[in-house]
Amino acid sequence: IAGITQAPTSQILAAGRRMTLRCTQDMRHNAMYWYRQDLGLGLRLIHYSNTAGTTGKGEVPDGYSVSRANTDDFPLTLASAVPSQTSVYFCASSDSARTSAYEQYFGPGTRLTVT
Amino acid sequence: AQKVTQAQTEISVVEKEDVTLDCVYETRDTTYYLFWYKQPPSGELVFLIRRNSFDEQNEISGRYSWNFQKSTSSFNFTITASQVVDSAVYFCALSVLLNTGTASKLTFGTGTRLQVTL
C-alpha cells in the first residue's frame, strides 16, 4: 500500500506558468487536503475536499484551484505562478467517515520554486 | 479561530537527556482533537498521536509521553532518554470540524526543531 503519492517531487517553475501538482491516495479516504509549508509559519491549509465532487477553501486559497473528480485524486493547480508560491506542498487525507478519527496522513511533499 | 503556539523554536539536548516540547492551543470549540507530528530531515510528516478533547488521560508510548491539560490548554510532549534519531521538527496541531460537518481542518503550530547530539 503506497498511501499518498505526490508528483513531482520537486519543480522549478518560471513565474507566470501554469502548474498542476498531483496527489493520489489509495486508502479510500473521503477527505483530502492541500497544505503549504513555509519556514516559520508551519503548515497552512490551501484547499480541502470533503468527498469526491466537493471542494472548499482553506486559509490561503488565493492563486490556487483544486478539483476532486474521484476519491483517489486531488490535484492542485497554480494558474499563473508567482514567486510567493515558492514552498513545500503537502497533500493529506483522512478517513472522516470514522468520526472518532480525523488524523490526517501526509504525502511526501512537492518542493516548488517559482523564479 | 484556532491557534496553536509552540514557543520553543529550537531545542538542543545531549543524547539520553529528557526533553519536553511545549504546545499551547486556543479554540472555542468544545470538541476538538490535538495531534503531534514528527518531520525528520527527510521531510515527510509522521503522525505520532491524537488526543480528543474529552480524554485528558496522559499517554505513554515507549520513550514518548504526552501530557494533556485542558485547564491550561496545553498538550506537551516529552521524550525520555532522547536519541539522535529523535532529531526532527515536531509539530503540534489542533483539529476542529469544518462547517461541512465532516472534513477537519488542522491548525499547526510553527514547530519546534529538536537537535539531539552525542
Image: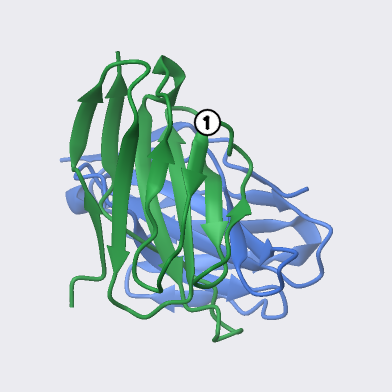
Chain colours: A green, B blue
Q: Residue under label 1, please give it.
A: A63
Task: Using the rendered view, name the quadrant where residue B38 is placed.
Answer: bottom left
Locate residue B108, reporting x and y percent. Answer: 55, 47
The answer, for residue A88, to whether it is visible in the render is yes
The quadrant holding residue A72 is bottom left
| Relative height, residue B69 to residue A19 (above, below) | below
Q: Nearer the viewer, residue B69 or B32?
A: B32
Picture coordinates of residue B103, whole percent (x, y): 60, 69
Position of B93 with respect to B91 (left or right) is right
Q: Residue at x 33, y 23 (%)?
A: A17
**Crowdedness of circle 1 by 10 Å Cα count: few (<14), some, many (20+)?**
few
User: Which residue is more in the foreground, B54 or B102?
Assistant: B102
User: Is B84 drawn above or below residue B99 in the view shown?
Assistant: above
Q: Nearer the viewer, residue A113 or B6?
A: A113
Residue B114 seen: no
Q: Quadrant of the C terminus of chain B?
A: top left
Residue at 55% in and 46% down: A45
Is A49 on the left or on the right of A11, as rendered? right
Q: Quadrant of residue B69?
A: bottom right
Residue B74 percent location from the top left of the image: 67, 56
Residue drawn at the location 37% of the way across and 41% of the way down: A89
x, y (%) of residue A92? 41, 60
Q: Please count the marks in the image.
A: 1
Q: SS of the residue at dot 1? A: loop
Q: Chain of mark 1?
A: A
Label 1 amino acid?
Gly
Drawn side of residue B3 relative to residue B117, left or right: right
Kindly identify the residue that appears in the image at 67 percent across and 76 percent down. B56
